[in-house]
């Protein structure tokens, strides 16, 4: 059942990225282009998502267990350390260069675009390097 | 600053779907979605590998299902510079794994939990992204 839920949640998330046009790097770069021609759409995507995820999280986090799993797995790390900051700086710079973050990058593979393929393959190389040095 | 290409309604609608996905995954499977984590955990040993893989397959299936119900074409405009794609892709992969999250993991799931760590991460990658776009515009 967990596997089916996972697939369905992936599909809903992917459709959300298509409808919001966040699958389009140009749209994301438009959001980051705050000092020139600004496209505020990405902020509305985040508001839309948070309006649902925030109350649901706080309503269910103290329940005994999720419906189809034995326990909730919630990140416990509270430390604001160098890895968090350095990692976020690298991510932000890479994000700003092309306009793709992991979700839209993987989702855009559906369009069989060669650039997305190169980006995703490089992203996995990046994951691998970070796993190795950590 | 000029406001251009602003599409609040489709942005909000897509955002609600993303929020629904995060909410369902939490209520049903007990996990908070973070796509960089889900993807990069395919390279480590853990017991959620198939679950994670299927989530990514779902992501890729999303646009295909959208195409079945909509005659609106999915248009994306992406750089075709090989070197830039490789550098940016590697930085995104390295940075999100090192910092334990991306736009979904920190920006949505983490902020939903009111995690200070995620709020700081989100502000950091957004500010750095804005600076990067600003500098690329000058070059």
Image: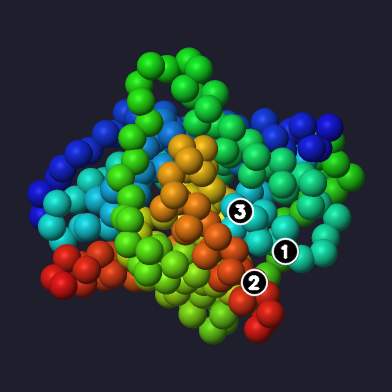
| Residue A108, image x, y percentages | 47, 43
Determine the chain carrying the residue at label 1.
B
Circles 1 and 2 in contact, beta carbons < 8 Å? yes
* In the rendered image, residues at marks 1 and 2 fall on the same chain: no
Calculate the distance from the C-alpha at mark 2 to the C-alpha at mark 3: 17 Å
Residue B25, quarter of picture:
top right
Residue A90 tag number: none
Q: Residue at x 51, y 44 (%)?
A: A109
| Residue A121, image x, y percentages | 55, 60
Residue B43 tag number: 1
Calculate the distance from the C-alpha at mark 3 to the C-alpha at mark 1: 15 Å
Q: Residues within 10 Å of mark 1 (few under 14, many from 20)?
A: few
Q: Residue at x 56, y 80 (%)?
A: A83
Determine the chain carrying the residue at label 3.
B
Q: Residue at x 25, y 51 (%)?
A: A30
Q: Residues within 10 Å of mark 2 (few under 14, many from 20)?
A: some
Counting the numbered discs, the total is 3
Give the vertical position of B1 relative to A133 (above or below).
above
| SS for callout 2 | helix
Residue A128 tag number: 2
Q: Residue at x 76, y 66 (%)?
A: B44
| Residue B49, image x, y percentages | 79, 52
The quarter of the rendered structure image containing the N terminus of chain B is bottom left
Calculate the distance from the C-alpha at mark 1 to the C-alpha at mark 2: 7 Å
Determine the chain carrying the residue at label 2.
A
**Residue A130 visible from this viewpoint:** yes
In terms of depth relative to the viewer, which is nearer, B4 or A74? B4
Q: Nearer the viewer, mark 3 or mark 1?
A: 1
The residue indicated by pointer 3 is B34
Residue B117, quarter of picture:
bottom right
Give the vertical position of B130 relative to A53 (above or below).
below
| SS for callout 3 | loop
């Amino acid at each position: 059942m967990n596997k089916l839920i996972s697939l369905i949640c992936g599909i809903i998330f992917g459709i959300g990225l298509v409808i919001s046009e966040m699958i389009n790097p140009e749209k994301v770069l438009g959001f980051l282009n705050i000092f020139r021609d600004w496209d505020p759409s990405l902020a509305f995507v985040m508001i839309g998502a948070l309006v649902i995820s925030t109350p649901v999280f706080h309503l269910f986090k103290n329940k005994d267990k999720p419906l189809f799993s034995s326990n909730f797995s919630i990140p416990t790390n509270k430390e604001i350390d160098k890895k968090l900051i350095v990692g976020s700086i690298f991510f932000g710079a890479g994000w700003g260069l092309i306009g793709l973050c992991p979700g839209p990058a993987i989702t855009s593979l559906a369009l069989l675009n060669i650039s997305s393929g190169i980006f995703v393959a490089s992203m996995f190389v990046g994951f691998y390097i970070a796993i190795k040095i950590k | 600053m000029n406001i251009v290409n602003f599409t609040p309604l489709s942005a909000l609608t897509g955002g609600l779907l993303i929020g629904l996905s995060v909410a369902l995954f939490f209520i049903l499977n007990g996990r908070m979605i973070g796509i960089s984590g889900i993807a990069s955990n395919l390279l480590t040993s853990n017991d959620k590998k198939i679950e994670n893989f299927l989530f990514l397959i779902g992501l890729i299936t999303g646009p295909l299902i959208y195409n079945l119900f909509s005659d609106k074409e999915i248009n994306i405009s992406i750089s075709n510079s090989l070197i830039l794609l490789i550098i940016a892709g590697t930085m995104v992969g390295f940075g999100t794994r090192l910092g334990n999250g991306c736009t979904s993991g920190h920006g949505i799931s983490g902020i939903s939990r009111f995690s200070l760590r995620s709020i700081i991460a989100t502000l950091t990658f957004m500010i750095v992204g804005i600076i990067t776009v600003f500098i690329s515009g000058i070059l």
